[in-house]
Image: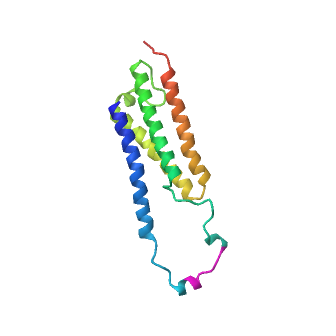
Amino acid sequence: MRSLCLIVFAAFALTLSANALFAQEQRDSQPDAPTPQSDAARPRTASAKPSAETHRFWDKENDWLFAGVAVSRGLDYSSTLNFRRRGRNEILLTNAIVDNHPAFAAIEAGATGASIGVSYLFHHYGHHSLERWTSIVHIGLTTGGAIRNYSLKTAH
């Protein structure tokens, strides 16, 4: 239980610290104030205006969604270890991987990172609705799997 709390805390802290780092990168990468000549020489197009749907990747909604993914992965970690202690066999991974707690925790953390990475790809290419739904579906499926793990009967 202590390792689960540590994993959830680390994922949440990483999410919050990444927000500050991303904001710093944005500020540093922006050029200084444009000169009047370069602004006048640039053609005006409709696509140059930011659309109402665009948002920063590390906004408040994504922060909460990514924290939810991390918590649901922690719940999956604890529920899987619980049903392994009750004599059940893991279906998706081998029992040896699940019984190796550091390796299994790394897999859960990697799944959280992969979910954030897929969301970023959707964000980068302008699919903002899919960006949000990636986390929502991940939370739902992982939480549903954890509920199933806890509801299985003991095999002993």
Write the start and end of the magenta stretch as one range.
39-45
**Horizontal and vertical percent for residue 134?**
56, 45
Residue 86 position (above or below residue 135): above
- On whether residue 41 falls in the magenta region, the answer is yes
Q: Residue 145 placed where, x, y %?
A: 52, 30
What is the quadrant of residue 22 in the picture?
bottom left
Residue 98 percent location from the top left of the image? 39, 29
Does the image show residue 114? yes
Look at the picture and state if 148 lies above or below 16.
Answer: above
Which corner quadrant of the image does residue 37 belong to?
A: bottom right
Q: Coloring scheme of the render? A: rainbow
Residue in the image at 54% along x and 31% along y: 144
Q: What is the residue that sits farthest to the bottom in this orientation? A: 37
**Residue 41 coordinates in the image, percent (x, y):** 58, 85
Which of the pair 80/16 is nearer the observer?
A: 16
Quarter of the image that includes the C terminus: top left
Q: Residue at x 54, y 44 (%)?
A: 135
- Asked whether, in this view, residue 34 is left or right of residue 102, the answer is right
Q: Residue furthest top?
A: 156
Q: Residue at x 50, y 55 (%)?
A: 59
What residue is at 48 percent from the left and 27 percent from the top? 91
Q: Is residue 138 left or right of residue 112?
A: right
Query: Farthest front residue?
Result: 60
Determine whether 35 is above or below 7 in the image.
Answer: below
Q: Report whether residue 94 is seen.
A: no
Q: Which quadrant is home to the N terminus?
A: top left
Toward the viewer: 85 or 92?
85
Which image quadrant is residue 108 in?
Answer: top left
